[in-house]
Image (tube, helix red, strand yellow):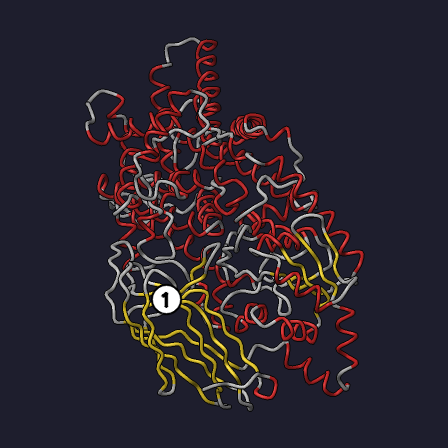
Amino acid sequence: MTDGNQSASRPLVIRHHTSGLLLPALLVAATTVLLAFFRSGLWRYDLFVPIQYWGDAVYFEVIVKALTEGGWGHYISRLGMPFGMDSVDFPTAMHLNLGLMKVLSIGVRDPFLLINLFWLTAMGLGGAFAYLFFRWLGISNANSICFGILYGLIPFGFFRNVGHLNLAHFMVPAGAYLGVSLARVEVFRLVRQKRTERTNYRDWRRFILTLGICAAIGLSYIYWAFFTCIIVFLGCVIGYCRSKNVNVPLSACIYLGIIGLAAGGNVSPTLLYWQRNGPNLEAQSKVPAQADEYALRIRQMLTPISTHPLRFMRSIRDKILAAGFPFDRNESFTATLGTIGSLGFLLLLWAAIAPAPGTLLCHRTVRVLAGMAIGVIVVATEGGFGSLFSVFVSHEIRGYNRISPFISLFSFAALGVASDRFLRTVAHVPRFMILGGIVCLGMFDQVPLDILTGHEAAQVQFQKDRDYIRQLETKFPSGAMIFQLPHTNFPLDVAPNKMVSYDNAKAYLHSKALRWTWGNIMGRHDNWARSTAQLPVDQFLKRIVFVGFEGILLDRNGFSDGKLEEELSKKLGAGTKFESGFRWVFFDLRPFRKNLETTLSPGEWERERQTAGLPTSTKIEWRGGFSTLETSKENSWRWCSKTGIIRFSNDSDAAKVIDVSGQVFVYGATPYPLSIQRDGQRQQLQVSQEPVVYHDRFVLAAHTSADISFDYGGPLLEVPTDPRQLAFQLQNFQWYDEEPNKAAPVNQ
């Protein structure tokens, strides 16, 4: 099934017997895992505690916990109360990873142990698949083992670890195989190039293997599918330009088609959900300019890790960071290649720029790898074609730094070819000693030691959280609903005050039967949980009790003072408070519910119960120049251009009293006028860098709408990296509605 061109007569797959490859591949996988386990210091800690217990890692731990409880994480019934959490609305789309973890969960039921073991296993698989890729390139067995282990230990895998479980890079060598095979013109012979040539379809084993790789890549995280398509395209261009063989683009189309179909199936649950419920515009936060913010940078690929054992290497890193290059401190720093990988990368650049005939730089495999590396850089670097793709096609792919594992693989492959040439005259024992030394050097050079910084304290906190939630579960029946304060948005979970993103999810991680409000997806159910948490305490307590909540879990780290805790204590009475001894405090709502029941007839209670849990009949739309919601620990805000409109619509049969508040802010000390109009009434504010309070309260008749219009009289901000028109911010905007007979009088 290979092309008839004599210059590219290698078979499509490795010519060695499978049994001769399996044992070395397992050796590479096991060695990679052991070196990672001991060099990182993980052996000193309890594997039943997640490697990371903060930030994005907590969200992936939620998904894995849902997986061990029998689902796939598409819908989590114990989160997002009272509706449940449609996590499919926030696509992670990594069904290959979930499938592997599902298999592991047969023997490992604890979600935290499972996620740790999967991460280590994925590193081992990455090394094993890299070994197979190097052997397919014709690199000797010893060198393939050496550089396969080094690839399994690339810094990218450690920096991402369980915090970005979807970015486990074990499928990268398989994706690289597809592209490099096209560049080497090792393709399916689908069309006869010559009249005497026969079209061959008989090798089904090779055909199925290749299509299986394409399907597996499509079912992995969408970034790996997208990056593999880039690699396939580059391989197609290189292979066709070299051979003019029409089978190259035809084979590439097959690869892209299968990857696309599998990727479509991978994201289909999300697409179906969006088709039924509409896209979630409020949860969208990506903009095209972020393709440069999170781009691949040569400078960062060559930067040593922060915990390098050599002081000289650490000083190089410190000097680079001290230069203050923009965006050097975001996730793109994870693209570092390590010293050995950097040498291989420089070798590829040299081969691409100045190939010398008769030298290693003109080696056929090195030249192909150099072309692939240059192509990847042209696409993924800051200002590359990836940024144009973000502007004209889709800005959902923005983290182009994440393509660095392909660069690492090509770099190690080039060094493998070089080692074969320079070590071929060396006796076996010295050669193995040299390669073993390279592995040891790479282990110290590539494995960052700071991934477990603070892990000892995290283990203590993990145990405290677990013990407290287990005590709570003994006090309440299975399925009891708990409202969490402060409310934090999902997926843009930037927690307030001293909290960290996804802190509210930790209660679910340690519970077996209780149900929690965290996981209410912003933009769905009319933000019921968020609007409920913003109500005055009396109304808040009544609403959640009518819905059926039996307790409140308050995180003191989410508040700058204890006013809310004190007010809840007064309203709910003595004996309802359950201390944790640290950040959490719990309030039992059952006594309050009993007292409330005595004040209402059964019919009144039922009416209140039916309406309290429904999404509010008052809708809000952000129109004109208002952008999506953004948050920090201190504030939430929406940017607006010079004009914007907030529209309130009352779909109920009764009038509503709407209460809105917030602050208006602009950059710069010069004050500018801001006119705010509603139903002919005007507020005139002078806004500057000191936030100005905005408040309005009005009656909205049944089945009507009202527009609050903003008209700013100052200049736009000049922000070259942001395509939006930015004039002013509306900060910490809150609103709630009441029926007129329950509300205080409105002074119009």
Left or right of residue 356: residue 607: right
Q: Quadrant of the N terminus?
A: top left
Snapshot quadrant of residue 312: top left
Work out whether 712 lies above or below 379.
below
Would residue 11 appear left or right of 127 to someone viewing this image?
left
Residue drawn at (26%, 47%) of the image: 384
Position in image of residue 324 (x %, y %): 31, 38
**Image point 59% across, 44% down: which residue?**
53
Count every numbered label the image shows and give the total: 1
Residue appearing at x 34%, y 38% in the figure: 180
Q: Is residue 106 left or right of residue 644?
A: right
Say which of 76 and 574 sits in front: 574
Query: Taking 698 as reference, is 460 above or below it?
Result: above
Q: As displayed, is residue 399 above or below residue 119? A: below
Q: Which residue is mark 1?
A: 627
Visible in this render: residue 8?
no
Q: Quadrant of the C terminus?
A: bottom left
Q: Position of residue 119 (x, y in %)?
A: 56, 39
Q: Position of residue 380 (x, y in %)?
A: 31, 45
**In terms of depth relative to the viewer, which is nearer, 237 or 598?**
598
Closest to the observer, 641 or 669: 669
x then y, percent, for residue 211: 45, 48
Judge whether residue 598 can be spotted in this image: yes
The residue under label 1 is which amino acid type?
Ser
Q: Is residue 743 left or right of residue 346?
A: right
